[in-house]
Image: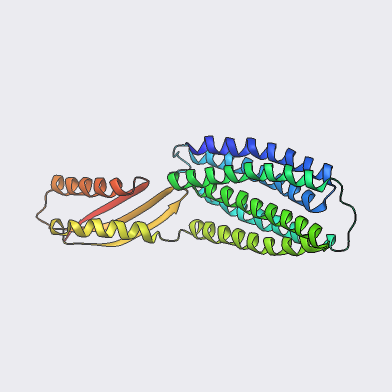
Amino acid sequence: MRKKQAAIIALTCGIAIFILKLSAFFVSNSIALLSDALESIINILASGMMFVSISISEKDPDQSHNYGHQKIEDISCLLEGVLIIIAALFIIITAFERLSDVGYLLQLNLGIVISVFATSLNLAVSLLLLNTAKKTGSNALEGDSKHLMADVLSSIGVWAGLIIGQIIGLDYMDSLLAFVAAIFIVKMGVGLVWKSSHSLMDQSCSDEEKIISDILKQHDYRFIDFHNLKTRRSGSIVFAELHLSVASSLSVKEAHDLNDHLEADIKAVCPNINLTIHVEPS
């Protein structure tokens, strides 16, 4: 599945999920379910932002953006992480306020059933986005997938709290479990911010560097050595460059053919790599 198709599915389902969760609040009058529904608004905004970022990232390089527009995916992933953290803080605040608010629940069981259906849809979309992200290397899709997964965990915490609270008569149980869920959600958000920040700061790609080094070592009888290997990630594209020292007796055509051969071998393993090899006589 293409990245843009996955983004459209996420946005469409996000709107449907919000309507379902809002319905769950109306029939139950549960503040916990209301906070769960309001968090879905952030999901809709995040999915919309992801769709825009993917649309921009797929544009071809132009005169103003020689290396393409893929960095917008990393920016989207960063903002996704921030939104996840904000959503978690909102859950904490709402749960704290609910500690002193009891005896207001209406058709709680029906509200939970509606919420379970909405969250099942949320989980399916999250797994779809994660699978597409792994295939395409899209940080934006991964960010939205983890955002939706955080929403799923939050919803489960809400259900558990409401159900356990009803069974044992502890009205504050849902708030306590919401706090725990929020901690895990914050951790997920911080992880996205950390990962996207490294990408935006052009952190080297150790996995790709190892692959390049291993392939070059398989052909080391054809050149003297290689050095100055540098890599950085931009969205789903990895940019790599290196210097290749060859014998001074090598003709320009032979050096060019060697360059093409090495590039082909590396791209066969890493198809999303943009490789530049600087050949120098030694």
Q: Is residue 72 in view?
A: no
Residue at the far front in the pictured view = 167
The colour scheme used here is rainbow
Relative to 11, is 107 on the left or the right? right
| Number of marks drawn | 0
**Above/below status of 241 relative to 2:** below
Relative to 212, is 39 on the left or the right? right
Q: Which of 136 and 233 is in front in this view?
A: 136
**Above/below status of 194 relative to 57:** below
Q: Is the C terminus in the top left, top right, bottom left or bottom right quadrant?
A: bottom left
Query: Horizontal and vertical percent for residue 266?
Result: 28, 50
Q: Nearer the viewer, residue 81 or 182?
A: 182
Q: Which of 142 and 124 is in front in this view?
A: 124
**Above/below status of 59 relative to 188:** above
Q: Is residue 117 in view?
A: yes
Q: Which of 3 and 31 is in front in this view?
A: 31
Residue at the far right in the pictured view = 103
Query: Horizontal and vertical percent for residue 186?
Result: 65, 61
Query: Horizontal and vertical percent for residue 104?
Result: 89, 52
Q: Residue at x 11, y 52 (%)?
A: 250
Q: Residue at x 68, y 61 (%)?
A: 181
Query: Horizontal and vertical percent for residue 270?
Result: 33, 49
Residue at the far left in the pictured view = 249
Q: Which residue is drawn at 80% across and 62% down?
A: 168
